[in-house]
Image (spheres, rainbow, N blue to C red):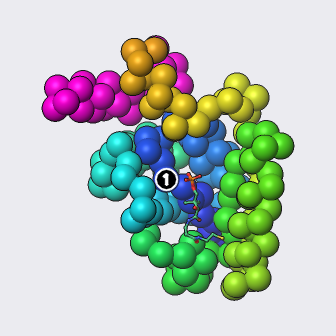
Amino acid sequence: MRRAVCPGSFDPITYGHLDIIGRASKLYDVVHVAVLVNRNKQGMFSIDERIALIEETTAQYGNVVVESHLGLLVDYCRERDIPAIIKGLRAVSDFDYELQMAQMNHGLTGVETLFVPTSPTWSFLSSTLVKEVASYGGDVSHLLPETAHRRLVERIAERRAQQ
Ligand code: PNS
């Protein structure tokens, strides 16, 4: 079995993530989508909510496994015998930090990082920007799967009602 992992925060999943996961699923027998838990960052969605959205939207590929992980990405890979990390590169601005992480991860355990150029359609897209635009009432429905968009609009409304 040839395995790879697509790691990230996925708060929430967007079409940019799906672009990379879908393309990775054609190259590998099994693609693990690892939702990394960042204890210092309060997300808009819980880890379970993110996983549910990813599972729903990646079911179409048939070879995607979705899991959460608290700790180092290299440990996730080592525990599951995953030799490759797949990362999307949107622009040159992504490159510096991604290169640093790839070199650190390789130095730690020898795991390789493969960069996939994001489709130009989604090169401007990030979950952070989607949340910001949506929170001010902007239409982001074309940027993320329908269920994720619905949940995002609901969550923003819930938060507003609590204020
Ligand atoms: O979607 P994001 O937030 O850009 O993803 C970044 C992520 C989660 C892939 C990265 O922060 C990560 O790998 N975190 C896990 C902890 C870890 O291994 N840190 C050392 C990186 S060299």
* Depth order, front residue of 58/119: 119
Task: Tell whether circle 1 marks a residue whose Cβ is less than 8 angstroms from ligand 1.
Answer: yes
Image label count: 1
Q: Is residue 105 visible?
A: yes
* Depth order, front residue of 22/130: 130
Q: Residue at x 83, y 43 (%)?
A: 92
- Dominant SS of magenta comes to helix
Q: Residue 44 placed where, x, y %?
A: 35, 43
Q: Secondary structure at mark 1?
A: loop
Residue projecting furthest to the front: 163
The relative height of residue 146 versus residue 63 in the rendered view (above or below) is above
Q: Is residue 86 left or right of residue 34?
A: right
Q: Residue at x 23, y 26 (%)?
A: 160
Which quadrant of the figure contains the C terminus? Answer: top left
Amino acid found under the numbered disc labelled 1:
Ser
Which quadrant of the figure contains the N terminus? Answer: bottom right
Q: Residue 55 placed where, x, y %?
A: 39, 49
Which of the 4 image quadrants contains residue 53?
A: top left
Read off the magenta span: 139-163
Q: Residue 3 placed where, x, y %?
A: 62, 69
Q: Is residue 114 visible?
A: no
Q: Is residue 7 left or right of residue 156?
A: right
Look at mark 1 in the image and give the residue it sits on. Answer: 9
Q: Residue at x 59, y 63 (%)?
A: 5
